[in-house]
Amino acid sequence: MRSGLPEIVYRFWTNRTALHILFWTCLYTVLVLLGAGWESYAKRALETGIYLLFCAAATYLHFFLLERFLSRRRYSLYCGGLVATLGVLGLLLNWISSFYSRSRGYLPATIFSLAFFIGFTTAIRFAREGIRQRLKLQEVSAKQLQTELALLKAQINPHFLFNTLNNLYAMALRQEDQATAQGIARLSHLMRYVIYDSDVERIELSREVEQIRSFIELQRLRYSEDDNLRIDFETGGDLDSCTIAPMLLLPFVENAFKHGIRLSSPSHVQLRLAANDGAIRFFVENSVHGITANAAEGDSALGLRNVRRRLELLYPGTHALSICESEGIYRVVLDLAPGIPKRP
């Protein structure tokens, strides 16, 4: 498929010779069938063939003038060539028609008919070129979007990795060998998902949820039971019936842990995910400790900024993202509209 067209249609549309042969054949057939009865079919076929032969000559000579002179803004040469083309071909057609009609036609009418046909075919040419240009722009745009999405995912992956490695490094400094080993194992599982399993357009929502749970457990290794911290993750609905772009929700979770937890103060991270009839709602709430929403979305929140752009590209017009801060609480609500059921 190219720009929404089947490959065979695209190839035919871009094959100039095939299109021209089809155009002249169809036009000749229509003019013959509509302009003659059975008793004069042969004569009409001959007259139409001669007339279209001159029309074709006028058309292609005009195309030559367009490319050679008009496109180069050599207007005097273009106008002179057009007048000469219409005059010479009009005289010849008028003279030849006198042999099978036994009377000379009206020369101005003959020239006018050729000029009208030139205008008609020129309009078709410009319309076709416009459509071809739009198809090319759509194809280029699609490739650019794919490249941008790949770059965004490439930015998210190292960002996620570096933050997690920093956490493991901190645990290693505290000589928490068992916790560090568990963290490395969970990180390995997560990175396999990030690098290999997420290299698809859509993934089951349940698998994204599984990775969120792994990430939460990885974060829990940083804290002890004595810490004044509450972490909740609730899910509801039929998670297996929906698909989602991979790594779309994790940046929100990572952002909540990064900016929502301070061991010196009561902290909480609350996550809720619901899927109903193809619609997905993801709710994230975390405490804020002297960090404004603007700071949370600055350079230190690269993953959150990237996911905004991914939403614009992957779910144009079918998503709603709300981010707000009030009374020391930072909230994110993401709604994905129905229409993304799991593929069979």
Image (cartoon, helix red, strand yellow):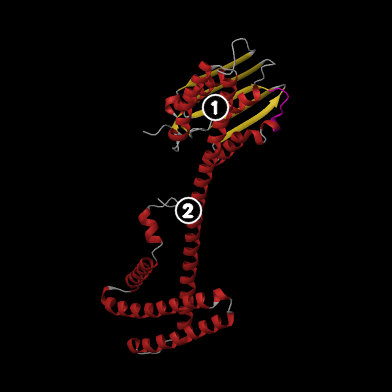
- Residue type at tag 2: Glu
Q: Earlier in the sequence, mark 1 or mark 2?
A: 2
Front residue of 109 and 5: 5
Q: Is residue 292 magenta?
A: yes
The disc placed on residue 139 is 2
Residue 214 on image: x %, y %: 49, 22
Q: Quadrant of the C terminus?
A: top left
Front residue of 278 and 110: 278
Tell me: residue 245, above or below residue 266: below
Asked if the residue under mark 2 is in contact with the one under mark 1, i.e. CB atoms within 8 Å, the reply is no
Tell me: residue 125, above or below residue 257: below
Q: Secondary structure at mark 2?
A: helix
Tell me: residue 60, above or below residue 99: above
Residue 312 on image: x %, y %: 56, 40
Range covered by the magenta-colored residues:
288-294
Q: Can you tell which quarter of the image residue 35 is in?
A: bottom left
The disc placed on residue 281 is 1
Q: Main secondary structure of the magenta part?
A: loop
